[in-house]
Amino acid sequence: MIEKIILGTVQLGLDYGINNPHGKPSLEEAFKILEAAFDNGIRTLDTAEAYGNSQEIIGKFQNEFPNKKFQIISKLASNAEITPENFITHVAHNCKVLNSDQLFGYMFHNYPSFKARGGLYDKLVLAKKEGLVSKAGISLYGNNEIEDILNNYDGFDFIQIPFNLFDNDSKRSVFLKEAKRKGIEVHTRSVFLQGLFFKPKSKILATLKPLITHLDTLESIKNATSINTQTLALQYVLQKKYIDRVLIGVETAKQLVDNINSCKDEQAIPHHLIDAIDVKEIELLNPSNWS
């Protein structure tokens, strides 16, 4: 399961997550996180131009530890002033910042910005042909977005979508299995729903109160199985055969090691019980709607 994990690095460059008391880590702590990831078998990082100085931190790490090189996936900033003419140069600049000869993956950061900049799609495919990028991808949210990509764009090698204990099999499996059928890798994010699964119910935002009944369901499942939240959330996603890679983010190296330890021994996850969780307020599954 550890081989499926991608380390997300938004926390290295920004304060991120509703349950993050640590804030953005120091450079020293960021290096500890990256070193712990490599030493424990994680070989792929996810970053983005919009993640503060995350790319610069990764580049510094790769420069100082040339024997611990990662495969790196990055994303085009939604507001970047990029034209088809300077797209290849822009990607090459990312490689330079990241101290990497090639990006393992380069993605459009979201569906709306992709649709608004259609001229860049062909350039991403070209960057792949020229060897600057190994795989072309796109970060999506809605199932309608997944359908459009699967039906109308054959140049993508992978999609990245939310998937977790609430945004689960009942919401996504039809579309993700179709992606697999078409030879497109499925990468997932938001495994902990920005830390919501760990937050005390007394401290949950008023807008998220409809989710409490589902949190109670999770509590019952945990009590019945003696599986903790961390292990349940991680292994539920990692065990899905139609999911290729699972993105996780952490604030400290210890947190990362704890997550990795939660994945070393396969647990008997009650998939049928979690798959049956059906959040009707689907807008609350998107953290951008929480504020």
Image: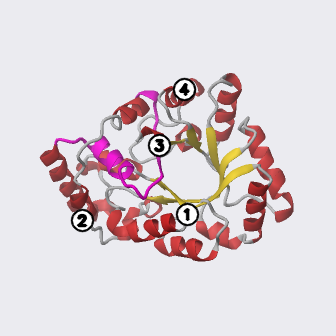
Residue 77 seen in the figure? yes
Task: From the image, tell me which residue sits under label 3.
Answer: 5
Please state, as top left, top right, bottom left or bottom right, where the N terminus lies in the image. top left
Task: From the image, tell me which residue sits under label 4.
Answer: 35
Mark with earlier residue (1, 3): 3
Residue nearest the observer in this picture, 272 or 89: 272
13 lies above or below 254: below
Residue occupying image coordinates x 76% and y 67%? 122
In the image, which residues are magenta? 226-254
Residue nearest the observer in this picture, 208 or 66: 66
Give how far across and how far down residue 25 sits, in percent: 53, 32
Q: Which tag is nearer the camera, tag 1 or tag 3?
A: 1
Residue type at mark 2 is Ala
Task: From the image, tell me which residue sits under label 1.
Answer: 183
Please state, as top left, top right, bottom left or bottom right, where the C terminus lies in the image. bottom left
Query: Residue 128: which quarter of the image?
Result: bottom right
Q: Residue furthest right?
A: 85
Residue type at mark 3 is Ile
Task: From the image, tell me which residue sits under label 2.
Answer: 276
